[in-house]
Structures are given as C-alpha cells and as structure tokens.
Amino acid sequence: MPLSNEQFNRVLEIFQERRRSAQKLRDERVKEAYGRLPGLKDCEEKRLSLQMEKARALLAGDREGAAALEQAALRQSVRKRELLEEAGLPGDWLEVPVRCRLCGDTGFVNGEKCRCFRQAEVELFSRDSAMQAALLKENFGTFSYRWFDDTRPLPELNGKTVRENMRGHVRTAKNFVARFPAEPHSLLMTGPVGTGKTFLCHAIADALLREGVPVLSLSAPEYFDRMAQAAFGSGEGGSFEEVMAGAELLILDDLGMETTNTFVRTCLLRTVNDRLIKERPTIISTNLRLSEIAERYTERVASRILGGYKVMVFAGSDIRSLKRSGS
C-alpha cells in the first residue's frame, strides 16, 4: 500500500520548504554580493542577456551564432566566479544552495523518487522513535574505549580482551559505512545487555544519515508492531512497507524483546530473505545466542542469517551499569 495522500503531501511540503529557504538564502547572498562588488551585477546581467540572444539564435536556426554567444556567456560566468573569489567568497556563492544536487531539492529524478525523498519518508515514520534522539549522543565521535575491560582475555572472544574485541567491531562498523552501498553485506550483533551493540547501531545510522542514506532504525518490538499494522490495520500502517522498501539500511535493535508468535517468525523470515535477495543491508542486534535464535525463530531464519550476515560477538560487563555507578 503506497503512502496516503496526507503522508505524501507532508513529504512534499518538506521539499517545498527546503526550496523556499534555499531561494531566500540565495537572494540574501545576491544582495550582499552586489553591494560589495558593483561590477558583479553588470557581469551577471551581461551573461543573462547573452543567454537570451543564444536562445533567439537557436530558434532562428543560427547554430554558429548560438555557439559564439554561448562562449561569450561562458566568459562572463568565469569572470563572475573570479570576482567572487577575489572578494573571498566561493565561486558558486550566487547559486541556489540546494541540499541534493541530484534532484535540486525537487525530490524526483526522471520521474522517480530521489534518494533524498526516500530518506524524508523514512524520517517521517521514525521521527518519534527514541533511537533518533539517541543518535545525537551515540555516534563514532562520542565513542570511548574507557568502559571496555582490557585486562582479562575471554574464551568466548577467542582469547581477546573485551577492549580488543570492541576495537575490531568498531573497525568493522566504520568499514561498513565506508564501503556502503558498494558491499551490501548485513550484520548480526549478538551478546549480553549493555555491551555496546546498540551504540554501534546508532553510530552506523548516524554516519550514513549524514551522507543522505535512507536509514530506518527501530527497536524490534516497534518494527513488528508497524508490520502488524501494515498487515492487519488500516490508515498509515499500510504505507510502512513502502517506506521500509525504500530504506537502504534497516536496523532492528533488541531482537528478542518482542512477543514472539507465528506472525513475528513469518515476518522476520520474509524481511531477512527479501532484503538479502534485493541486496539491501540489514543490521540486527540481539541478546540471544545463535542457538537461541534458531529455537525462537526456526532453523530456517537462523540459517538465512548465518548464511548472509557477518556475525559480531559481544561480551563483557553491562556498560550502562558501569556508567551509572561511575566505575
């Protein structure tokens, strides 16, 4: 089921406001630049006049004259850039400062939704998620190894300390971002509560969102509730599947915290399977061990995850408890 008219219009309003704001900023820059550089306005007026003469020449069939006029207009563009740079301003200072150069903040490219439009759809659905607020404080810039023990090798980490293990996971997470979407692999983060899984999920989401990647990041209970609304409800619930399909990365945090039933098992299998087939990466974090995933969601689900995901094992003390106690 596609977005409702109301939802679609809400996204369109976002882009209309972006264009209005960009045009207002451009007008302010033009006023400032013309005031500081009197010759700039004359240069721009000459360029526009030459472009109009070129159009008339083309309509008259004078291709040679149009080419000459195009070159003259180009020289005025070069001169305009030189004037701006001599004044310490960027050469493109008078252009409309659009966010997305692919679509010019229209939201569409060749009649299809632009990546930025799909990101706005995802944000529309995840705006109220607690994870969105968490991205402000849980990202690669705020990450610290201080809370990860570096004194005791653990057998479940193949003889590594918790800190050594976490250094490897941070490298994996940063490589995931750096290679996205060229290498569309998925990640399974498994381990006890408070060992850094959710933090890394948020760090990856934050880094990709900053690059304009549509990321849908939800807790597993919230995700399955949305899917149930899409399957059995009405109204906005039905359009959630379209938004999910547009998300280049899906993050399911805390798998296993939901009430598990036949619908959840079927839904998880379909989600995992469909996104693997379409090469759309998914990150799943869970407190469950691999054997428990098979027991809870069937061997088939576990098999698809183990076959298509990179498994990241976490261990150690509950960092949230350590931070609360100030240890």
Image: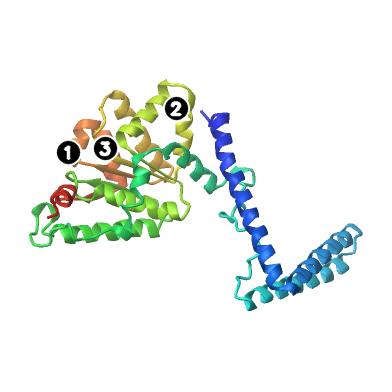
Alpha carbons under labels 1 and 2: distance apart: 33 Å
Rendered location of residue 315, percent (x, y)? 15, 50
Quadrant position of residue 250: top left
Say which label, 1 or 2, has the lower sequence index.
2
Residue 237: which disc? 2
In this picture, residue 228 sits left or right of residue 12: left
Mark 1, other Cα within 10 Å: few <14 / some 14–19 / many ≥20: few
Amino acid type, callout 2? Gly
- 128, 290: nearer the viewer: 128
- 210, 134: nearer the viewer: 134
- Name the residue that disc number 1 marks: 291
Please identify, in this view, whether the residue under mark 2 or under mark 3 is nearer the observer. 2
Q: Residue at x 21, y 57 (%)?
A: 166
Q: Residue at x 46, y 50 (%)?
A: 213
- Name the residue that disc number 3 marks: 255
Alpha carbons under labels 3 and 1: distance apart: 14 Å
Alpha carbons under labels 2 and 3: distance apart: 21 Å
**Secondary structure category for the residue under label 1:** helix
Quadrant position of residue 32: bottom right
Image mark count: 3
Rendered location of residue 158, percent (x, y)? 12, 56
Amino acid type, callout 1? Ser
- 121, 160: nearer the viewer: 121
Mark 2, other Cα within 10 Å: few <14 / some 14–19 / many ≥20: many
1 and 2 marks in contact (CB < 8 Å)? no
In this picture, residue 59 sits left or right of residue 304: right
Residue 261: which disc? none
Outermost residue, right direction? Answer: 60
Say which label, 3 or 1, has the lower sequence index.
3
Rendered location of residue 3, percent (x, y)? 53, 32
Q: In the rendered image, which quarter contains the C terminus?
A: bottom left
**Secondary structure category for the residue under label 2:** helix
